[in-house]
Image (tube, grey):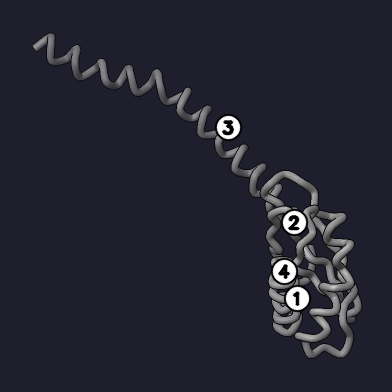
C-alpha cells in the first residue's frame, strides 16, 4: 500500500498537471491527437515526475509527448517556483483502464440480475391475475 502524499506534494503534483495540461494544448504535434492530462506523481526529492494522460481517439500519443518533454519541462521551470524542475516521464493513466474494467464488470452483473429476475417477475405478475379469475 502506497503512502499518501503530503499536502505540499499534492500541490506540486497539481501544479505540474495544470502546467503540462495547459502547455499540451498549445503544441501543434499531430501525434498528440486529443489527450487529457489526468494527473502527476512527483518523486519525494522533486527530481522526477510521472505525468499521467488518457487519449480518447485511440491513438498512442507517447512519442509526441516524449518529443515535447523538453518544452513542457521548460514551461514548468518558468511557471513553478521549485528548487528542482522535475524530469518528466509520461504514462497512460491506469485509473481510466481500471474504471472501464469495473464498468464492464458491473454491466455483466447487471445483465445476470435482469436474466435472473425475469422469470420471477413474470410469475409474480401471473399470480394476482389467476387469483382474480378464480374469485
Mark 4 or 1, nearer chain start: 1
The residue carrying pointer 2 sits among few (fewer than 14), some (14 to 19) or many (20 or more) residues within 10 Å by Cα, namely some
Mark 1 or 3, nearer chain start: 1
Which of the labelled discs sits on residue 93, or is there none?
A: 2
Mark 3 or 2, nearer chain start: 2
- Foreground: disc 1 or disc 3: 1
Residue under label 1, please give it: 16
Q: Check the image and report above or below for 103 versus 51.
A: above
In this image, 41 relative to 97: left or right? right
- Label 3 residue SS: helix
Foreground residue among 83 and 125: 83
- Label 4 residue SS: helix
- Label 1 residue SS: helix
In this image, 31 relative to 129: left or right? right
Residue under label 3, please give it: 108
Residue sitting at 40 percent across and 22 percent down?
118
Q: Check the image and report above or below for 73 versus 50.
A: below
Res 74 seen here? yes
Q: Do the residues labelled 3 and 2 touch (CB within 8 Å)?
A: no
Residue under label 4, please give it: 26
Amino acid at each position: 500500500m502506497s503512502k499518501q502524499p503530503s499536502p505540499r506534494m499534492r500541490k506540486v503534483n497539481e501544479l505540474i498537471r495544470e502546467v503540462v495540461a495547459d502547455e499540451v494544448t498549445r503544441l501543434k504535434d499531430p501525434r498528440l491527437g486529443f489527450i487529457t492530462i489526468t494527473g502527476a506523481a512527483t518523486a519525494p526529492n522533486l527530481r522526477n515526475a510521472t505525468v499521467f494522460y488518457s487519449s480518447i481517439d485511440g491513438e498512442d500519443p507517447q512519442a509526441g509527448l516524449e518529443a515535447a518533454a523538453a518544452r513542457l519541462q521548460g514551461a514548468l521551470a518558468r511557471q513553478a517556483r521549485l528548487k528542482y524542475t522535475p524530469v518528466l516521464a509520461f504514462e497512460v493513466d491506469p485509473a481510466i483502464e481500471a474504471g472501464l474494467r469495473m464498468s464492464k464488470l458491473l454491466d455483466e452483473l447487471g445483465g445476470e440480475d435482469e436474466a435472473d429476475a425475469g422469470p420471477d417477475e413474470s410469475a409474480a405478475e401471473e399470480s394476482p391475475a389467476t387469483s382474480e379469475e378464480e374469485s
